[in-house]
C-alpha cells in the first residue's frame, strides 16, 4: 500500500514538474488507447513506478557511497543525487516508445528540486501506512 502511495505522489510530482520545467517532458505514444488524456495518465503512472523503484533500489546505494559528499556540502548533494536518479529514470524509459525526457543535468537539478518540494507537500497531505500504524 505504501508503494502505491509513493507511486501516486511521484506521479503527481513528475507531472506537475513537467508542466513547469521546459526541458522535462513526457513522451506519449497516442496509440495506447483512444483517449490522449488516458494515454498521458498511463505513461505518467509507468514513469512514476520506474522512478519509485529507482529511488527505492539505487538511491540508498548511492547515498552510502557518497556519504562524505553529503557531509562536505551540508546536505546539498542530495539535489545532485536526486537529479541523477531522475536522469537514470529518463534513460531507462527511453528504451520504450513512451517515457520521460530530461534535456540536461541542470534541467534535472531544477526538476529534482521541484519534485522534492511537491513530494514533501504531498507526503504531509496524503495519508500513509506509517501514520495510521502510529495512531493506533
Image (cartoon, helix red, strand yellow):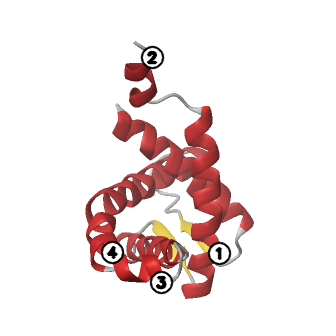
**Considering depth in this image, is 118 or 49 the residue closer to the camera?**
118
Q: Which residue is mark 1?
A: 110
Provide the secondary structure element on which disc 2 rests.
helix
Indicate which label's residue lies in the foreground, 2 or 4.
Answer: 2
> Residue shown at 44%/73% (left/top)?
90
Give how far apart the Cα atoms at labels 2 and 4 are: 43 Å
Quarter of the figure that contains the N terminus: top left
In which quarter of the view is residue 131 placed?
top left
Q: Position of residue 81 (x, y in %)?
A: 44, 75
In which quarter of the view is residue 112 placed?
bottom right
Q: Mark 4: few, some, or many residues within 10 Å (few <14, many ≥20)?
A: few
Indicate which label's residue lies in the foreground, 1 or 4.
Answer: 1
Q: Which residue is mark 3?
A: 72
Q: Mark 3: few, some, or many residues within 10 Å (few <14, many ≥20)?
A: few
Give how far apart the Cα atoms at labels 3 and 1 are: 21 Å
Indicate which label's residue lies in the foreground, 1 or 2.
Answer: 2
Q: Position of residue 108 (x, y in %)?
A: 56, 77
User: Of callouts 3 and 1, which one flags the residue occurring earlier in the amino acid sequence?
Assistant: 3
> Residue shown at 55%/52% (left/top)?
40
- Residue 43 vs residue 122: left or right? left
- The reply to whether discs 3 and 1 touch (Cβ–Cβ < 8 Å) is no
User: Of callouts 2 and 4, which one flags the residue occurring earlier in the amino acid sequence?
Assistant: 4
Q: Which residue is mark 2?
A: 135
Q: Is residue 3 above or below residue 89?
A: above
Amino acid at each position: 500500500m505504501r508503494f502505491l502511495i509513493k507511486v501516486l505522489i511521484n506521479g503527481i510530482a513528475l507531472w506537475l514538474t513537467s508542466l513547469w520545467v521546459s526541458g522535462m517532458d513526457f513522451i506519449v505514444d497516442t496509440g495506447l488507447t483512444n483517449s490522449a488524456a488516458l494515454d498521458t495518465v498511463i505513461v505518467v503512472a509507468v514513469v512514476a513506478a520506474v522512478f519509485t523503484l529507482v529511488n527505492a533500489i539505487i538511491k540508498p546505494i548511492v547515498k552510502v557511497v557518497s556519504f562524505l559528499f553529503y557531509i562536505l556540502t551540508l546536505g546539498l548533494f542530495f539535489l545532485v543525487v536526486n537529479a541523477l536518479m531522475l536522469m537514470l529514470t529518463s534513460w531507462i524509459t527511453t528504451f520504450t516508445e513512451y517515457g520521460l525526457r530530461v534535456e540536461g543535468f541542470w534541467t534535472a537539478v531544477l526538476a529534482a528540486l521541484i519534485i522534492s518540494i511537491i513530494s514533501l507537500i504531498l507526503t504531509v497531505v496524503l495519508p500513509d501506512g506509517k501514520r495510521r500504524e502510529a495512531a493506533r
